[in-house]
Image (cartoon, helix red, strand yellow):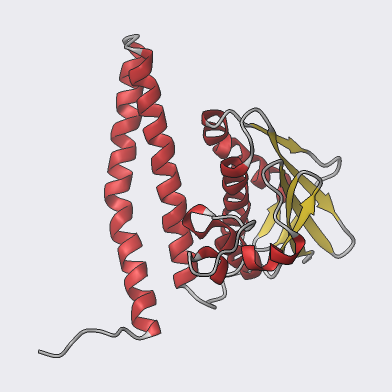
């Protein structure tokens, strides 16, 4: 029998896609059961510690969902999604922020969104932009000190739309910013002191998702913390 290894890049990407597809079914069942158990516990005024453990488990499952989405994104390589979807940015970003509130509350982090005065819209891939923002928020929540805030803001420029995610966690030095959002920076062999470990390759996935939308991800030290900026071109 022939040795099935080593795998080609195409085979490995296809296998990763199969793994994430197969993992989503049991994960979905676990989430459904946890949601049911949480509702029953609330209705019957059961032990608050039990309710908290169930809620924490739901949040952990959501982290797994995001990691699976990151694997799918990175396994897809340079496949280009449809970019003809007109998206209103505020509802999209607001939905992502609300989705991340449970994780923020669990970490005792305030999560705030600065809203724009006027509607901001563009044509891009909504799912990938949402994934990019979610990864940045999740990473900021992990590294921000307890009791601090993670700030999300939308800015309309002449030719691009900016989404900023700022935190007060340890600032990444300017010379390590590019490394932090690279594939090398996600590996134990490539990381350097001062760069962040991003669970589920969050920073690399955020960069990949932003670039899939035709945009970019930049990182700059911001006082005592760091600020991530997704820039996507305006398409009308």
Relative vertical location of residue 215 with respect to residue 153 in this rendering, above or below: below
Relative vertical location of residue 195 with respect to residue 216 in this rendering, above or below: above
Position of the N terminus by quadrant? bottom left
Relative vertical location of residue 118 with respect to residue 198 in this rendering, above or below: above
Q: Position of residue 160 (x, y in %)?
A: 82, 62
The reply to whether residue 121 is visible in this rendering is: yes
Q: Nearer the viewer, residue 203 or 71?
A: 203
- Rendered residue at 69%/70% (across/down): 214
Q: Position of residue 98 (x, y in %)?
A: 60, 36
Q: Nearer the viewer, residue 31 or 222?
A: 222
- Rendered residue at 46%/58% (across/down): 69
Seen from this angle, which residue lies furthest left?
A: 1
Q: Position of residue 101 (x, y in %)?
A: 57, 33
- Rendered residue at 41%/57% (across/down): 68
Compared across the picture, whether 58 is left or right of 138 comes to: left
Q: Nearer the viewer, residue 66 or 180?
A: 180
Quarter of the image where one finds residue 22: bottom left
């Amino acid at each position: 029998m022939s040795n099935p290894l080593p795998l080609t890049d195409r085979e490995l990407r296809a296998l990763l896609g199969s793994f994430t597809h197969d993992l989503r079914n049991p994960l979905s069942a676990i989430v459904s059961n946890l949601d049911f158990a949480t509702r029953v516990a609330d209705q019957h005024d059961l032990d608050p510690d039990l309710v908290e453990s169930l809620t924490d488990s739901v949040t952990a499952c959501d982290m797994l969902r995001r990691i699976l989405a990151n694997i799918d994104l990175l396994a897809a390589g340079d496949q280009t999604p449809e970019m003809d979807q007109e998206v209103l940015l505020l509802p999209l970003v607001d939905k992502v922020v609300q989705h991340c509130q449970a994780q923020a509350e669990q970490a005792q982090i305030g999560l705030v969104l600065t809203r724009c005065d006027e509607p901001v819209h563009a044509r891009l891939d909504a799912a990938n932009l949402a994934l990019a923002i979610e990864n940045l928020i999740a990473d900021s929540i992990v590294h921000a000190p307890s009791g601090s805030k993670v700030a999300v803001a939308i800015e309309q420029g002449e030719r691009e739309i900016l989404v900023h995610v700022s935190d007060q966690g340890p600032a990444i030095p300017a010379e390590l910013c590019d490394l932090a959002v690279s594939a090398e920076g996600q590996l134990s062999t490539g990381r350097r002191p001062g760069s962040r470990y991003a669970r589920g390759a969050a920073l690399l996935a955020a960069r990949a998702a932003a670039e899939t939308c035709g945009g970019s991800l930049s990182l700059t030290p911001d006082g005592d913390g760091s600020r991530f900026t997704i820039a996507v071109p305006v398409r009308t």
